[in-house]
Amino acid sequence: MAALLASARARASEYEAEHGGFSGKSNDDSDSETGIPDLESKSTRKDTSRKAFDKMFKQVVDAADVILLRPRRSRP
């Protein structure tokens, strides 16, 4: 996990160098050490994301010619 975080930070610094400076400081609700956003403060975004997913899923199912379902496990 630490290697993944180090790789992400290295890529971020490369991006900042190519696309202009980024101070690394932001006003969002995130953990000050890792920059990971707090999950509780993002609940409204999660709700709208779920609604968007459900809407797109319904469109795909409606447009599908065939829908494959997993068989239910029978209980003895």
Image: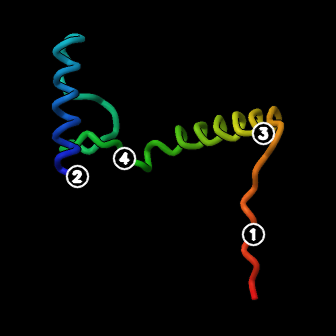
Cβ–Cβ under 8 Å for marks 2 and 1: no
Mark number for residue 72?
1
- Residue that numbered label 2 is attached to: 1
Mark 1 / mark 4, whichever is N-terminal:
4
Q: Residues within 10 Å of mark 4 (few under 14, many from 20)?
A: few
Tell me where residue 72 appears, x and y as whole percent: 75, 69
Mark 1 or mark 3: name the one nearer the start of the chain: 3
The residue nearer to you, when weighing 53 against 26, is 53
Specify the amino acid type for callout 4: Asp
- Packing grade of label 1 (10 A; few <14, some 14-19, many >=20) is few
Alpha carbon separation for disc pair 3 and 4: 33 Å
Q: Nearer the viewer, mark 2 or mark 4?
A: 2
Closer to the camera in the image, 18 or 60: 60
Q: Quadrant of the C terminus?
A: bottom right
Location of residue 34 (image quadrant): top left
Q: Amino acid at mark 3?
A: Val
Secondary element at tag 2:
loop
Identify the mark at residue 61; answer none if there is no mark.
3
